[in-house]
Amino acid sequence: MTTFTPTPVPPQPGQILARGVCRLLASHGFACVEEFVPKRGKRLDVMAIGPKGELWIVECKSSRADFTSDAKWQSYLEWGDRFFWAVDADFPVDLLPEESGLILADSHGGEILRMGPETRLAGARRKALTTKLARDAARRLQGLRDPRL
């Protein structure tokens, strides 16, 4: 039996930011899922669930062009209790809306510079999202242990 070992692909800039964001949020008791799809057609860079069940969305932007080409970010607001942008130290933060949260990150961690306003989700949506988040995370973990599943 031949074993196939894929060649590792270097992480993209947004993935590097996401790693730092997840490390930061983990230090605050959050569990994160990267590239979470709350429903078909929407993909969140990071969805995090906190110790009290709060759901935070973080969109990672690696450049001005990355930010200006994202026309759908406002439709993400209805899927979390708080919304944040995550950028690196070279990003022109004056481009980002002041009414959203801001995280400064790199591959090693980050810092919350501005909390996004809280808009609590309705109970039914919170339950559905929490269940989907748990199931997606469990499937990913299971896939690591058994890639043929």
Image (cartoon, rainbow, N blue to C red):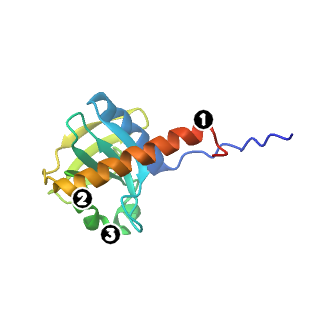
> Quarter of the image holding residue 44?
bottom left
SS category of the residue bearing label 2: loop
Frontmost of labels 1 and 2 is 1
Query: Relative to residue 5, is residue 57 drawn left or right?
Result: left
Chain-order first, disc 3 or disc 2: 3
In the rendered image, the quadrant that contains the N terminus is top right
| Residue 49 on image: x %, y % | 29, 41
Chain-order first, disc 1 or disc 3: 3
Residue at numbered disc 1: 145
Which amino acid lies under the numbered mark 3 shown in the image of this protein? Lys
> Quarter of the image holding residue 148?
top right
| Residue 77 on image: x %, y % | 23, 60
Question: Eyeballing the image, is 19 above or below 73?
Answer: above
Q: Residue at x 52, y 50 (%)?
A: 12
Residue at numbered disc 2: 96
Query: Relative to residue 141, is residue 49 drawn left or right?
Result: left
Which amino acid lies under the numbered mark 1 shown in the image of this protein? Arg
SS category of the residue bearing label 1: helix
Residue at numbered disc 3: 72
In space, the residues marked 3 and 2 are separated at their CA atoms by 14 Å
In space, the residues marked 1 and 2 are separated at their CA atoms by 39 Å
SS category of the residue bearing label 3: loop
